[in-house]
Image (tube, helix red, strand yellow):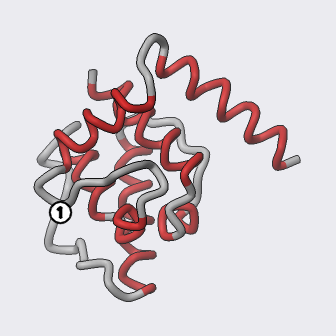
Amino acid sequence: MLALIWRLARYHYLALLGSKQEKDILEWANDIAGSVCTITGFGDKKISTGRFLIKLCESLDPEVVDWEIVTPGETPEDAEANAKYAISLARKHGAFIFCVWDDVVNANKKMMLILIASIYDIHI
């Protein structure tokens, strides 16, 4: 079952990317969220705090993000709360979500690539 879900997610992500390559999406994401942190790849552990993804969502609509409820993400509980908030923000803007908060906290490379590509697709 998981393999089927991954194939559907991968198909969707390839359609989102079109002629773009993963490095193009990574550059865009770092340009947008570089004030929070810069990541070296979609599996970078810096994603696990959730702040990077929240910053990407803020680029879609700055008025929607409430930075007062965003934590530093240093404890597992804070990282979980930020991850759930980031997914909620992305979903609110119409992003296709194939991941759960645990994928963010663990910086699951495949899921983060799809999530960031989906945010990119909405942004452009």
**Left or right of residue 2, residue 122 in this image:** left
Residue drawn at x 41%, y 49% as measured from the top left: 41
77 or 52, nearer to the observer: 52
Q: Secondary structure at mark 1?
A: loop
Whole-percent x, y for residue 12 in the image: 61, 25
Residue drawn at 39 percent across, 45 percent down: 90
Rendered-image quadrant of the C terminus: top left
The residue pinned by badge 1 equals 66
Residue sitting at x 47%, y 43%: 115
In the rendered view, tell whether residue 124 sits above or below residue 83: above
58 or 38, which lies in front?
38
Q: Amino acid at mark 1?
A: Asp
Residue at 66%, 31% (x, y): give it: 10
As drawn, is 82 to the left or to the right of 56? Answer: right
Q: Is residue 52 above or below residue 29?
A: below
Residue furthest to the right: 1
Residue 94: x and y in percent read 42, 34
- Around disc 1, counting alpha carbons within 10 Å, would you say few (fewer than 14), some (14 to 19), or many (20 or more)? few
Rendered location of residue 72, percent (x, y): 24, 79
Spot occupied by residue 48 in the image (x, y as percentages of width and height): 41, 68
